[in-house]
């Protein structure tokens, strides 16, 4: 018997003869104070994120690749990290080829060990999708996977995130219910409200201390 099996056996034995208590959780405690009209969700999210130095743009869903190119050109950045195994990654690559964009697209399509130095020190910007956003706290929700690992939103100085307007929820509980998180949580779920910041040094707030110095959110009007 493994150590794990031994621990589980003891836990089950400790429950023998006990009766589970009914779930009396009142969900209104975490939802009722944090509900907004659909037309107000974008404005609240935008207001909270801009307060912590996040750039937010609302645009038609079809126009985001051109906006990404504009953001890179304005900052004179030479490359962009993207996930070719995603739908938005494929859309970006097609646009880049047709537009003859000067910036290099760097595909995250290999183990980190094969290009660690380049990934850590030469990538200037990255593009990722999101699992939605929470209006109550002004937070993006990122769900890293094998296509878009956590490093894509953690390492590059500029992180550009795509957010569907229809996936902005009132509060965290509402998102968990709508997306059925109880059926399977990820090993690593991220909530991001702005670029990295710290006040550890002399209590002075500084941005870009341990992650992206800039966060740009593109809200796509998909409905």
Image: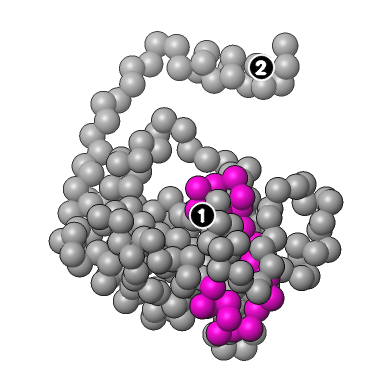
Q: Earlier in the sequence, mark 1 or mark 2?
A: 2
Label 1 – label 2 distance at C-alpha:
50 Å
Left or right side of 2 for 63:
left
Residue 31 in view, yes or no: yes
Circle nearer the viewer, 1 or 2: 1
Residue for point 40% across, 11% down: 17
> Where does residue 45 sit, x and y in percent of width and height?
32, 68
Left or right side of 63 for 195:
right
Residue for point 72% across, 11% down: 1
> Where does residue 64 sit, x and y in percent of width and height?
44, 66
In the rendered structure, find residue 91 and report the number of the disc placed on it. 1
Position of residue 188 relative to residue 164, above or below, is above
Residue 137 in view, yes or no: no
Where are the magenta residues, as a range? 69-89
Q: How is the image coloured?
A: one colour
Q: Residue furthest left?
A: 37
Total numbered circles: 2
In this view of the protein, which residue sits in the foreground, 149 or 35? 149
In the rendered structure, find residue 195 and report the number of the disc placed on it. none
* Residue 182 placement: quadrant: top left
* Residue 140 placement: quadrant: bottom left
Left or right side of 88 for 10:
right
In this view of the protein, which residue sits in the foreground, 120 or 99? 99
Position of residue 178 relative to residue 205, above or below, is above
> Where does residue 29 sit, x and y in percent of width and height?
22, 51
* Residue 76 placement: quadrant: bottom right
Position of residue 115 relative to residue 43, above or below, is above
In the rendered structure, find residue 6 and report the number of the disc placed on it. 2
The quadrant of the picture occupied by the C terminus is: bottom left
Residue for point 61% across, 52% down: 83
Q: Is disc 1 placed on a helix, strand or loop? A: helix
């Amino acid at each position: 018997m493994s150590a794990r099996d031994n621990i589980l056996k003891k836990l089950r034995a400790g429950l023998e003869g006990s009766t589970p208590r009914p779930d009396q959780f009142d969900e209104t405690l975490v939802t009722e104070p944090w509900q907004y009209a659909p037309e107000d969700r974008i404005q609240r999210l935008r207001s909270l994120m801009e307060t912590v130095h996040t750039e937010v743009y609302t645009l038609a869903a079809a126009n985001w690749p051109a906006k990404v190119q504009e953001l890179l050109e304005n900052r004179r950045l030479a490359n962009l990290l993207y996930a070719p195994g995603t739908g938005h990654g494929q859309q970006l690559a097609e646009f880049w080829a047709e537009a003859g964009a000067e910036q290099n697209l760097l595909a995250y399509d290999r183990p980190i060990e094969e290009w660690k130095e380049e990934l850590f020190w030469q990538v200037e910007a990255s593009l990722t999708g999101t699992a939605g956003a929470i209006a109550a706290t002004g937070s993006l929700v990122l769900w890293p996977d094998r296509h878009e690992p956590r490093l894509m939103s953690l390492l590059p100085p500029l992180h550009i995130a795509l957010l569907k307007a229809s996936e902005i929820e009132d509060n965290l509980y509402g998102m968990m219910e709508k997306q059925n998180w109880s059926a399977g949580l990820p090993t690593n779920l991220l909530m991001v409200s702005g670029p990295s910041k710290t006040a550890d040094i002399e209590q002075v707030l500084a941005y870009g201390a341990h992650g992206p110095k800039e966060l740009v959110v593109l809200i796509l009007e998909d409905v």
